[in-house]
Image: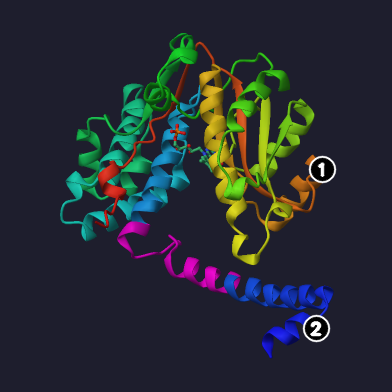
């Protein structure tokens, strides 16, 4: 009976019915995904250990960014420290082995550098000392700075990048947010996009699209809308990676563009590093108004999701950047044997 009905039903009707079914699934599964996200994410006031650690990594990163500025601003990060201090106490109370917790170590190291930089030149730190538990303030003073704070990156060390083995290239790539004044042309970036074209994608459907922006006026309008790059001079070039949803065939694939675009982004970051160009990935998790304004500014088709930006420039002779300490592979791996 079912097969007879199928044979008798014209294709446009089947397509319409399938479309309605797919729309309903898209709605329900998006809600289900939203609920799963809500149950776990590291919202303010969280009491979960992993979520507290995530927030601490975020604040460590904010301090590292402030420490890496070419024009260092004494007294920066007061609002960051106000949230940082109670979270550190929270982690200390919930982790019996906090001294060996990599998130704790990295946070204390970054704060150590913050403290030392101010103390070296006798800048007032009373505002910071007041925020921290006295024992934690002492621990910050005693930290050795080996796993948090800043790294110094030299342009001269990048000269032989084209012949470096993968592991070395990967280990020496760091996000840079301050660049030489020299412009970067689309022609310099194109060979790197060419390398990244080997990035795999679902069924080889290649949803990634790349928008290269070198117009300083457009860059200076796009960056404030991005929002995560405050306090830095504009980058000489900006690459926007998007995913074209016309490559996808069912509602199950609604997030695939972010995966494929993210993989492409990593390939491109390494290709830029190999070419001796400095870069920093930047998020495009924009609230609706800024998303709309960005789309309008850059003429992004409605069919595309924004995946990420990459700021690109030439290396300064020497610059500082965030250490961004990593977990160990064994910390994040579960083996199912
Ligand atoms: C998808 C993505 C979005 C990011 N967004 C920002 C951002 O908005 N602002 C920023 O300064 N850095 C941003 N970063 C850079 C990260 O802070 C950086 O990659 C991380 O700290 C690791 O450091 P590393 O790239 O030097 O290894 C982003 C990185 C990724 C992968």
- The overriding secondary structure of the stretch rendered in magenta is helix
Question: CB atoms at circles 1 and 2 under 8 Å apart?
Answer: no
Q: Residue furthest bottom?
A: 1
Q: Residue at x 60, y 65 (%)?
A: 252
Q: Residue furthest left?
A: 96
Q: Identify whether 143 is placed above or below 172.
A: below
Q: Quadrant of residue 27?
A: bottom right
Q: Quadrant of the C terminus?
A: bottom left
Mark 2 closeness class: few <14, some 14–19, many ≥20 residues within 10 Å: few
Q: Is residue 32 magenta?
A: yes
Q: Residue at x 60, y 76 (%)?
A: 28
Judge whether residue 233 can be spotted in this image.
no
The residue tagged with tag 1: helix, strand or loop? Answer: loop
Residue stretch in magenta: 30-51
**Residue where numbered disc 2 is placed:** 8
**Nearest to viewer (mark 1 / mark 2):** 2
Judge whether residue 123 can be spotted in this image.
yes
Q: Position of residue 213 (x, y in %)?
A: 73, 30
Toward the viewer: 317 or 237? 237
Say which mark, if any, is on residue 299.
1
Q: Position of residue 242 (x, y in %)?
A: 67, 44
In the rendered structure, the answer to whether residue 84 lies left or right of residue 331 reads: right
The residue tagged with tag 2: helix, strand or loop? Answer: helix
Q: Position of residue 97 (x, y in %)?
A: 16, 52
Toward the viewer: 79 or 7? 7
In the rendered structure, the answer to whether residue 248 lies left or right of residue 320 reads: right
Q: Position of residue 36 (x, y in %)?
A: 48, 69
Q: Quadrant of residue 14?
A: bottom right
Q: Quadrant of the N terminus?
A: bottom right
């Amino acid at each position: 009976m079912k097969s007879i009905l199928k044979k008798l039903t014209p294709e446009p009707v089947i397509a319409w019915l399938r479309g309605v079914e797919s729309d309903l699934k898209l709605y329900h599964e998006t809600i289900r995904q939203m609920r799963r996200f809500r149950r776990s994410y590291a919202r303010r006031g969280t009491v979960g250990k992993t979520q507290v650690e995530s927030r601490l990594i975020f604040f460590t990163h904010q301090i590292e960014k402030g420490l890496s500025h070419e024009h260092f601003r004494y007294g920066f990060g007061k609002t960051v420290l106000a949230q940082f201090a109670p979270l550190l106490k929270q982690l200390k109370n919930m982790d019996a082995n906090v001294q060996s917790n990599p998130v704790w170590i990295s946070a204390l190291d970054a704060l150590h550098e913050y403290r030392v930089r101010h103390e070296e030149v006798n800048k007032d730190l009373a505002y910071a000392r007041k925020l921290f538990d006295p024992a934690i303030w002492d621990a910050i003073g005693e930290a050795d700075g080996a796993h948090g704070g800043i790294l110094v990156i030299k342009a001269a060390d990048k000269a032989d990048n084209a012949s470096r083995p993968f592991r070395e290239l990967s280990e020496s790539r760091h996000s840079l947010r301050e660049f030489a004044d020299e412009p970067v042309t689309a022609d310099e970036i194109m060979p790197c996009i060419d390398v990244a074209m080997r990035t795999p994608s679902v069924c080889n459907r290649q949803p990634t699209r790349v928008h290269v922006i070198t117009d300083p006026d457009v860059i200076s309008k796009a960056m404030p809308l991005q929002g995560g790059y405050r306090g830095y001079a504009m980058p000489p070039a900006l690459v926007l990676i998007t995913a074209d949803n016309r490559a996808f065939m069912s509602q199950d694939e609604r997030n695939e563009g972010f995966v494929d675009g993210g993989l492409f982004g990593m390939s491109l970051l390494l290709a830029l590093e190999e070419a001796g160009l400095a870069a920093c990935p930047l998020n495009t998790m924009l609230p609706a108004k800024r998303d709309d304004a960005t789309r309008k500014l850059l003429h992004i088709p409605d069919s595309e999701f924004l995946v990420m930006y990459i700021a690109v420039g030439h290396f300064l002779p020497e610059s500082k950047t965030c250490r961004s300490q990593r977990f160990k592979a064994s910390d994040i791996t579960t083996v199912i044997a």
